[in-house]
């Protein structure tokens, strides 16, 4: 994504940076607009992440392959966020550009 011009804002309370990019401890610590909250956590953590995504007024949540939480997806959609679940951004990108 970074190679295609997207700004990556890592969120991980356990590390100070990811791939040389400074990491925020949580979504609420990010300043500015967040377009996509890309969730790479286990499904049991999704509801809390979605609540934070709604709080920061993210535009979308994307749950990676194997990350599924129907209730959190409904909550996000009801709050006006676009929702993608159980899909990989890279796989979807490659499918679209072929």
Image (cartoon, grey):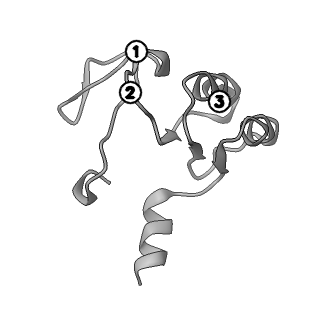
Which of marks 3 and 2 precedes in the sequence? 2
Compared across the picture, whether 43 is left or right of 37 comes to right
Give the CA distance from mark 2 to mark 3.
18 Å
Between circles 1 and 2, the one closer to the viewer is 2
Badge 3 density bin: few <14, some 14–19, many ≥20, Cα 10 Å? many
Compared across the picture, whether 18 is left or right of 98 comes to left
Give the CA distance from mark 1 to mark 3.
16 Å
- Residue tagged 2: 32
Residue in front for this viewpoint, 34 or 93:
34
- On the image, the x and y values in percent for residue 86 come to 64, 53
Compared across the picture, whether 7 is left or right of 32 comes to left
Q: Secondary structure at mark 2?
A: loop
Which of marks 3 and 1 precedes in the sequence? 1
Badge 1 density bin: few <14, some 14–19, many ≥20, Cα 10 Å? some
Q: Secondary structure at mark 1?
A: loop
Q: Secondary structure at mark 3?
A: helix
Q: Residue at x 35, y 31 (%)?
A: 10
Residue in front for this viewpoint, 53 or 14:
53
Give the CA distance from mark 1 to mark 2.
15 Å
- On the image, the x and y values in percent for residue 6 come to 31, 50
Q: Is residue 97 placed above or below 21 in the rendered structure?
A: below
Q: Residue at x 40, y 26 (%)?
A: 11
Looking at the figure, which quarter contains the C terminus? bottom left
Quick check: marks 1 and 2 in contact, CB under 8 Å?
A: no
- Residue tagged 1: 25
């Amino acid at each position: 994504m970074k190679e295609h011009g997207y700004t990556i804002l890592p969120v991980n309370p356990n590390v100070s940076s990811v791939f040389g990019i400074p990491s925020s401890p949580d979504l609420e610590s990010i300043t500015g607009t967040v377009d996509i909250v890309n969730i790479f956590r286990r499904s049991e953590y999704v509801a809390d992440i979605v609540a934070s995504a709604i709080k920061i007024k993210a535009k979308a949540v994307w749950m990676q392959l194997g990350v599924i939480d129907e209730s959190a997806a409904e909550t996000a959609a009801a709050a006006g966020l676009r929702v993608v679940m159980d899909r990989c951004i890279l796989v979807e990108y490659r499918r679209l550009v072929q």
